[in-house]
Each structure stands twice: as structure tokens, then as C-alpha cells.
Amino acid sequence: MALASTEAADALIRSDIDALIMVASSDSEIIQQLLRNKQLKLLDLRRADAYIRLIPYLSKITLPEGVIDLESNIPGQAVTLLAPTANLVITEDFNPALIVLLLRAADKIHSQASIFQHPGNFHPVNLLPTLLMKRQSAIIQPVRLY
């Protein structure tokens, strides 16, 4: 069932649906509302390792005990979750001189810590070979960003 995020969150709270899979920032108002709702519980994915082996664009993350709210101890125990990887995609005619600038901007935006990731978890150096479009005369080489 495809619902807009607000509609889906409301449906989950009303028990119209049993589960919700949502991709959003930990700072999202809807995510914060759902994480703090005492009627709801995060599903601890015991077989997360199997999923990440079978579906390569997923990553296993652990939400530590108390990371959402230390005083109220939310969640009450560490929870294993799955997160999709982010992909930066460019067209073949994208200006190659702008690739490094794009990666620096992405690094600045996405390397901050959040409840779902450690600081510096975004590694644009790993993305560069993917972003560079292979041309017959070009050799793709990783570039270190400073």
C-alpha cells in the first residue's frame, strides 16, 4: 500500500496498518513523532545480515539504547535496522570539473552525526569512480578530497 508519509504515520498510529517502512532523515518531524510514540515499537531485524547480503544497497545500522531520548531511555534496548544507501547519479554530459565540488558539498552535508549514523560515515572518495562516466579515452582513478 503506497501512502504519503504523513498518511502512513497516521495509519500506523491508528492501527490501520501493522508496519511501516519509511526512508527519511532522523530529524524529520514524522520520524521523531513515531520514535517517541509509546504505542509503537521499532522492529529489531535479527536477520539484517542476511538482507544486506541479498540486497546490496542496504546497510545494517544499530540504534543504540537511549539514543532517541536518554532520560526516557528510548529505545529501551539497542535495535538493529536497515538503511538504504544513498546514490549520487549524474548524466554523461555533466561537467567533470564540477564532480569534485559536488562531492565536497555532499560530504559537508552528509558527514554529520545523527541518531542513525556515526560522524564521517559518508565517504565521497568511494563514490568518485561511480560518478565518473567511463569514456573510451578516460581512465577512472579515485581522487582523495581534502
Image: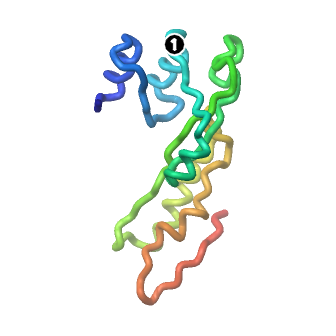
Count of numbered circles in the view: 1
Rendering colour mode: rainbow
Task: Using the image as rendered, state which of residue 2 and residue 31 is in the foreground.
Answer: 2
Callout 1: few (<14), some (14-19), or many (20+) C-alpha neighbours within 10 Å?
A: few
Q: Is residue 15 left or right of residue 40?
A: left
Instruction: Say which of 35 and 27 sits in front.
Output: 35
Q: Residue furthest bottom?
A: 137
- State whether residue 109 appears in this view: no
The three-letter code of the residue at mark 1 reads Asn
The answer to whether residue 122 is seen in the rendering is yes
The structure residue drawn at horizontal position 65% and vertical position 68%, both measured from the top left corner, is: 144
Q: Is residue 56 left or right of residue 74?
A: left
| Above or below, 35 relative to 82 | above
Label 1 sits on residue: 37
Q: Position of residue 6 (x, y in %)?
A: 35, 23
Pick the residue in front: 23 or 120: 23
Rendered residue at 67%/11% (across/down): 72
The image position of residue 141, as x and y in percent, is: 58, 77
Instruction: Give residue 14's position: percent from left, percent from top.
Output: 37, 11
Say above or below: 106 vs 144. above
- Residue 65's place in the image compared with 114, above or below, is above
- Vertical position of residue 66 compared to residue 119: above or below: above
Quadrant for the N terminus, please.
top left
Residue 51: give x, y in percent of width and height. 54, 45
Quadrant the C terminus occupies: bottom right
Mark 1: which secondary structure?
loop
